[in-house]
Amino acid sequence: MMPDQYAVIGNPIGHSKSPLIHSMFAKSTDQNIKYSAIEGPIDRVDGFELKVREFLNAGGKGMNVTAPFKLRAYALADQLSERAKLAGAINAMKFANGEILGENFDGIGLLKDVQSNLKFSLTNKRVLLMGAGGAARGALLPFIEANPAELIVVNRDVAKATKLVNEISSNVKLIACGYKDLTDQKFDIVFNATSASLTGELPPLNPEVFTHSGLAYELAYGKGLTPFLRLAQNAGVKRLADGVGMLAEQAAEAFQWWRGLRPSTSSVIQLLTVPLK
Ligand code: NDP
């Protein structure tokens, strides 16, 4: 039988770990799929949309979406999940009866990694989420569902964080602020969902926020000890983590959505882990 076709689309795409991850999942669950990497064109306005339609029309079953197309994929989808709507971006598509269903598994993948793999519960904790871009937006709803005591979203552009927080009605104490407003604030868990580490930068974070922190989590992966993680380590935080587990868990969520069964993520995490030093 011909394998079912899946792909990840992005630009650039050469660095994507998704083909490797999904082929490992397929092998371990005995699923007959082919998962490829597609470079989405950025030289014409509808290049991404045409590529997706081409894949769908050729019988493709689903796609992952990575930078810079998550917002365009959101606009292209015919149906969206609640968390995708709040995130305003999608990272997975399923094709059914010619329609495109959109999902965002980044946030739920992050929560799974923290709670199931790292065994850190967010319940009743004071949580700091740095950043208000796509990854932070995706994390917000799953984080709220974990019922933290307080969830603070800090961003350089404070208006962006405020807008995000105002879009949500929740029983959880949810606050948006700027980095200067964090004086004398301490958190049990700190997440870096900014893209600062991708360019070796450090957000203007006062290390006092880590005074009681049990975990500092960097969403970027494969970068070793980023400036954020180093700051946390120097402030005495015992557990440091990067986004490799999040990457594996969001992939497992997509795989389950497409194939109806959830693969184990441990060998993927083991293979892709880069030491934090
Ligand atoms: P976006 O471009 O959507 O958002 C970037 C965010 O970073 C903004 O809030 C921006 O603030 C902030 N920022 C950038 N530079 C700095 C800086 N020097 N100081 C303070 N804030 C800064 O990025 P994404 O949300 O898509 O990605 C964020 C991170 O999450 C990246 O590291 C990415 O690799 C990671 N990620 C990991 C995944 C995984 O599976 N592990 C999946 C998806 C993302 P402002 O609004 O003020 O400009």
Image: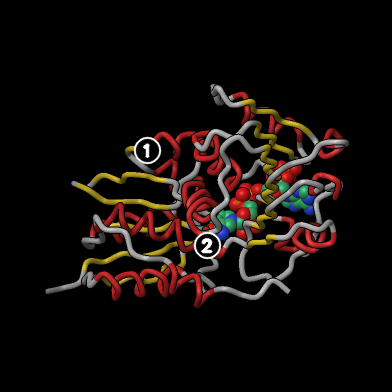
Mark-to-mark CA distance, 2 and 1: 25 Å
Q: Is mark 1 within 8 Å of ligand 1?
A: no
Q: In the rendering, at what x and y percent does residue 135 appear?
A: 58, 48
Task: Give the number of the disc on residue 68.
Answer: none
Is residue 145 left or right of 158 when viewed as pictured? Answer: left
Is residue 220 left or right of 253 when viewed as pictured? Answer: right
The amino acid type, in three-letter code, at marker 1 is: Leu
Residue 200 visible, this angle: yes
Mark 2 secondary-structure assignment? helix
Mark 1 secondary-structure assignment? strand
Q: Residue furthest left?
A: 1
For the residue pair 22 and 44, the one nearer the viewer reads as 22
Colour approach in the figure: secondary structure
Task: Give the number of the disc on residue 80.
Answer: 1
Q: Does residue 272 sit above or below 213 in this rendering?
A: below
Report the residue at 32% width, 44% height from top. 101
Report the residue at 73% width, 74% height from top. 277
Disc 2 designates what residue? 245
Residue 45 visible, this angle: no
Q: In the rendering, at what x and y percent does residue 257 appear?
A: 30, 52
Q: How many marks?
A: 2
Q: In the rendering, at what x and y percent does residue 142 appear?
A: 50, 40
Is residue 252 left or right of 135 when viewed as pictured? Answer: left
The amino acid type, in three-letter code, at marker 2 is: Gly
